[in-house]
Amino acid sequence: MKAIITVVGQDQVGIVATVATKLATLKINIVDISQTLMAHNFTMMLSGEWDATQLSFAAAKTALDQLGQQTGLTIHIQRQELFDAIQKL
Amino acid sequence: MEAKAILETIQMVAEENLDIRTITMGISLFDCIDSDGVKARQKIYDKITTSAKDLVTVANQIQTEYGVPIINKRIAVTPIALIAAASGDQDYVAYAQTMERAAENLGVDLIGGFSALVQKGYQSGDRKLIASIPQALAETKRVCSSVNIGSTRAGINLDAVGEMGRIIKQIAATDPVNCMSLVVFANAVDDNPFMAGAFHGVGEADRVINVGISGPGVVKRALEQVRGQSIDIVSEQIKKTAFKVTRMGQLVGSIAAERLGVPFGIVDLSLAPTPNEGDSVAEILEEIGLESVGAPGTTAALALLNDAVKKGGVMACEHVGGLSGAFIPVSEDAEMIRAVEAGRLGVEKLEAMTAVCSVGLDMIAVPGDTTAASISGMIADEAAIGMINNKTTAVRVIPATGKQVGDSVKFGGLFGRAPVMAINPSQPQAFIQRGGHIPAPIHSFKN
């Protein structure tokens, strides 16, 4: 399963590490990653891939929602097909 | 994938109110016909509740996984006038109650198809169904009704036009709010996923998934980027945006159809406003360059918008259908309400707009003392526009019992608030009372 994960929040030390650690625990492979600061807001986009037989989308979403609450970051996860459908011919 | 493309997609949903307005499952009830009404209704209940048992679950799953809000889950059934005709029942309110019970059990928002098709004449079930509409709408919350009184191929049934004026008055006498669940059509379409006019056409498959998408906010935002540029650029920008929006509908519809094991029908790309700020069709017209919707030029701007939306949508999905275009329901569009209240938009201008938009006089409140004949006259005018121009037109008008121009009728939620609008006081009584049938136009003879 492929998904786009976006992380937005107040810039702080270790955001990339925190998110990447969580993804590693969930066995979500990071295929692509980009990160920038927009008006002091940390903004990161990740393309992640994992084995759908090992981890359901709902479980991945719940885990990331929890991480978001713990860290005060806004973390969204959406399946990649949506982006492909809208942006690619 | 580029970061810009990802951000744009997220922004379309998060800030510009892009959503799947409805996933509507069409269900044929022809195999439920029975000479015993009780048995027929049991079959109807069973067929609806088994066919759509996973509809809400699947829609919620898709919403979670793809991050796209799916606002409504709905069901459309074969016009009940056709299904109930074989029973000896004298009124069809019990069929509406069956539909209500099935919809409630499934957790769907609305169920359409308490309908009759009388463009050429009445069959025995049609008269009973139409007579049952006021009570059916008073006793149910989710049931939607529609009556097709004219078409380009058949002309206009003036007897039915007269009757529907009286029926609408009768509904309003109990509660004007119930009028929002009834649409009077000309050239009604068989695969419309939008309410209140959705029904499952007689030529449709046993079950089908149709999707209605929206996104006036997305189009408005896209047009902000081309301010001051030529109208050609405006048209291009709308087409590109409509393309993206429709792609989402195609994706969601095909996933829903696959998970439900039902064939995927059509995507209806309709810019359907909601009373939320930034979700208005009137604002798009104003972005194109009108000081207010209703200004001279409004019809031209709407024609361009409607056509560009269709052009963008057609290439983006396998099958476009339904009503596809721009909706102009007054009560559901915050900017439209403001224009009416400021005296900048009247019923006559709205009627002109319906000649080029995708539907008709929609969610319009008129004074409580408006006569049945005047309402029939409005229906006849709309039907004539549809008949002559080969397009769907509709009337969903609300006589605001006990209210005058300056008052308003509140519907709540997505249906908003309708300011009572002035209508021409002169009467079409003698015209409507003639009854009979307006013949089909010359261009209907295409064989």
Image (cartoon, coloured by chain):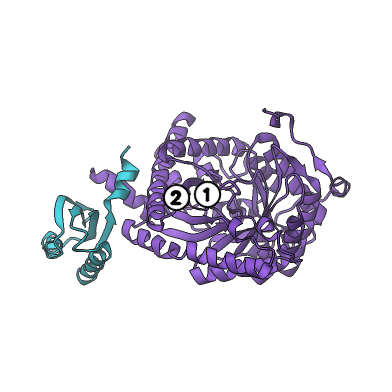
Q: Is residue A41 left or right of residue B169?
A: left
Badge 2 and badge 1 both on one subunit = yes
Q: Amino acid at mark 1?
A: Ala
Looking at the image, which is closer to me, B315 or B431? Answer: B315
Can residue B8 be seen here? The reply is: yes
Residue at mark 1? B205
Q: Which chain does the numbered disc 2 sit on?
A: B
Q: Residue B360 in the image: x percent, y percent? A: 64, 46
Q: Residue furthest top?
A: B447
Q: Are marks 2 and 1 in contact (CB under 8 Å)?
A: yes
The quadrant the C terminus of chain B occupies is top right
Q: Which chain does the numbered disc 1 sit on?
A: B
Colour of chain A in the image: cyan
SS label for mark 2: loop
Q: Which residue appears at 59% of the width and 41% of the height?
A: B357
Label 2 packing within 10 angstroms: few (<14), some (14-19), many (20+):
some
Colour of chain B in the image: purple
C-alpha span from label 2 to label 1: 8 Å
Q: Amino acid at mark 2?
A: Pro
Q: Return the mark for residue B263.
A: 2
Q: Residue B77 in the image: x percent, y percent? A: 58, 57
| First in sequence: mark 2 vs mark 1 | 1
Looking at the image, which is closer to me, A87 or A58? Answer: A58
Q: Where B437 falls versus A5 (above or below)?
A: above
